[in-house]
Image (cartoon, rainbow, N blue to C red):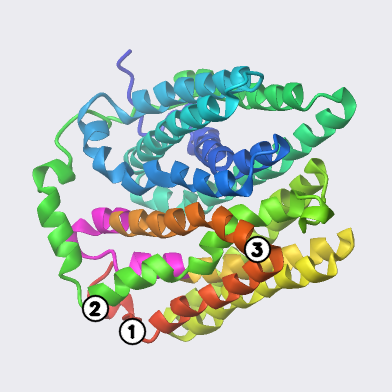
């Protein structure tokens, strides 16, 4: 088939048909690998030490820019998208099949690694396709749509799928079968996504294999230009440590909510956790992100970053309170919503800063480098989180989290926060 479309005269190829489905499909495997896996392993009795080590699954997103040129020069973005969706569907179905094996932990981790690489490649193809399939005006208009449906996939994955797993466990009284059904269901969703996108994704005339910018210019030159920025050392340190506290908290907060009270946890049922963190929490996170974006657009990053950074970090104290008081479910909903709302505000400031420092002719590559450093800053502390929690217990661990938020605040004194227009950033 050699059809091409610029969407101007093809209603069946209208962006509203495929932008929502693409970005839902982009977000779902990421949240399954990095969040749903924590709940699954906790249900299976895997220790917090091992759960913390699963942060290594973020590695493909750290280094995905390294194989982006291969995606650019071999086949089309459209082909990569539909091929990766087949791989993701097969990977999830395969994952469901190994849960009953005695060596399920090792085998499932290997499959999760494969799914992570498929997902990172899928991300590259979708983001590239977005820029090829839509003109500049459409790109600006649909940026909110793509973000919204990415968030919906997060709610679906960490909320509804987890709730489904919990309810199935109650009704079937079979934890393994319940998770097998959930993962197989997620896998079949990707088969459906493949079939839909196989027939409904457009064929942009510019979506052809060819030399990418990254290939025309050496990686060395791109990295050198990134490292030549003013104040690059404090910038890199800031990217690595801004979310240091949250990095060690990320894997252990679900473990804390799911652990039995005698182990220091809140003892939430799986389906209740899905509603608390995966639904109410993610909605609060999204609202916080929207508010953060509005505040920065109105007042500028320089005026907003301090209060927004504090909104990211100070709400972490709710975990100290919950670990001591073991409050009722209604209070847990409120506290988690508050913490996630603050996270949404503070994380927005961070992402805007990364856009500010993506400058010049290599701004796309610079932004990719920054997000790779960001993922590294989350991955390494996350890998240690299980060991730290096991050694300290939940209350002392959460107090430590509060202290780990301080380095990120200190770096705010040293990073450039001037208006991007004055620095030549578009």
Where residue 120 appears, x then y in whole percent?
Answer: 40, 38
Which of marks 1 and 2 precedes in the sequence? 2
Which of marks 2 and 3 precedes in the sequence? 2
Circle on res. 287? 3
Where residue 362 appears, x then y in whole percent?
Answer: 20, 57
Asked if the residue under mark 1 is in contact with the one under mark 2, i.e. CB atoms within 8 Å, the reply is yes
Q: Residue at x 52, y 41 (%)?
A: 30
- To which residue does mark 2 refer? 231
Inspect this view and state whether residue 70 appears: yes
Which of marks 3 and 1 precedes in the sequence? 3
Rounded to the nearest angstrom, the CA distance separating label 3 from label 2 is: 32 Å
Check disc 3 and report its element: helix, strand or loop.
helix
Furthest residue in direction front, as rendered: 391
Locate the N terminus and report the quarter of the image it occupies.
Answer: top left
| Mark 1 burial class by Cα count in 10 Å: few <14, some 14-19, many 20+ | few
Whether 356 is among the magenta residues is yes
Boundaries of the magenta span? 350-368
- To which residue does mark 1 refer? 414
Quarter holding residue 203: top left
Say left or right for 292 vs 140.
Answer: right
């Amino acid at each position: 088939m050699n059809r091409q479309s610029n969407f101007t005269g093809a209603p069946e190829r209208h962006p509203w048909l495929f932008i929502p489905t693409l970005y839902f499909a982009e977000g779902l495997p990421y949240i399954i690998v990095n969040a749903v896996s924590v709940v699954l392993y906790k249900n299976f009795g895997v220790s917090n030490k091992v759960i913390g080590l699963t942060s290594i699954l973020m590695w493909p997103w750290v280094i995905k820019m390294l194989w982006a040129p291969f995606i650019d020069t071999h086949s089309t973005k459209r082909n990569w998208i539909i091929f990766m969706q087949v791989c993701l569907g097969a990977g999830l179905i395969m994952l469901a099949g190994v849960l009953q094996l005695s060596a399920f932990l090792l085998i499932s981790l290997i499959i999760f690694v494969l799914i992570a690489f498929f997902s990172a490649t899928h991300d590259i193809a979708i983001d590239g396709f977005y820029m090829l399939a839509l003109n500049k005006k459409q790109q600006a208009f649909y940026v909110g749509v793509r973000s919204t449906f990415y968030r919906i996939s997060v709610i679906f994955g960490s909320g509804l799928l987890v709730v489904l797993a919990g309810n199935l466990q109650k009704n079937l009284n079979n934890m393994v079968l319940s998770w097998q059904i959930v993962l197989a269901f997620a896998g079949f969703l990707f088969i459906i996504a493949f079939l839909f996108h196989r027939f409904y994704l457009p064929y942009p005339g510019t979506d052809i294999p060819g030399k990418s910018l990254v290939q025309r210019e050496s990686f060395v030159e791109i990295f050198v230009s990134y490292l030549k920025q003013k104040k690059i050392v404090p910038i890199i340190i800031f990217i690595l440590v801004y979310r240091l506290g949250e990095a060690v908290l990320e894997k252990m907060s679900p473990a804390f909510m799911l652990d039995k009270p005698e182990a220091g946890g809140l003892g939430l049922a799986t389906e209740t956790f899905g509603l608390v963190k995966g639904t109410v929490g993610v909605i609060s996170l999204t609202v916080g992100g929207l508010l953060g974006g509005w505040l920065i657009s109105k007042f500028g990053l320089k005026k907003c970053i301090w209060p927004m950074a504090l909104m990211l970090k100070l709400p972490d104290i709710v975990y100290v309170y919950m670990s001591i008081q073991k409050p009722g479910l209604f209070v847990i909903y409120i506290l988690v919503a508050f913490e996630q709302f603050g996270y949404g505000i503070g994380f927005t400031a961070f992402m805007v800063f990364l856009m500010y420092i993506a400058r010049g002719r290599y701004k796309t590559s610079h932004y990719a480098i920054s997000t790779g450093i960001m993922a590294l800053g989350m991955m390494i502390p996350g890998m240690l989180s299980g060991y730290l929690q096991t050694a300290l217990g939940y209350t002392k661990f959460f107090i430590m989290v509060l202290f780990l938020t301080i380095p990120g605040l200190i770096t705010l004194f040293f990073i450039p926060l001037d208006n991007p227009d004055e620095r030549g950033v578009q």
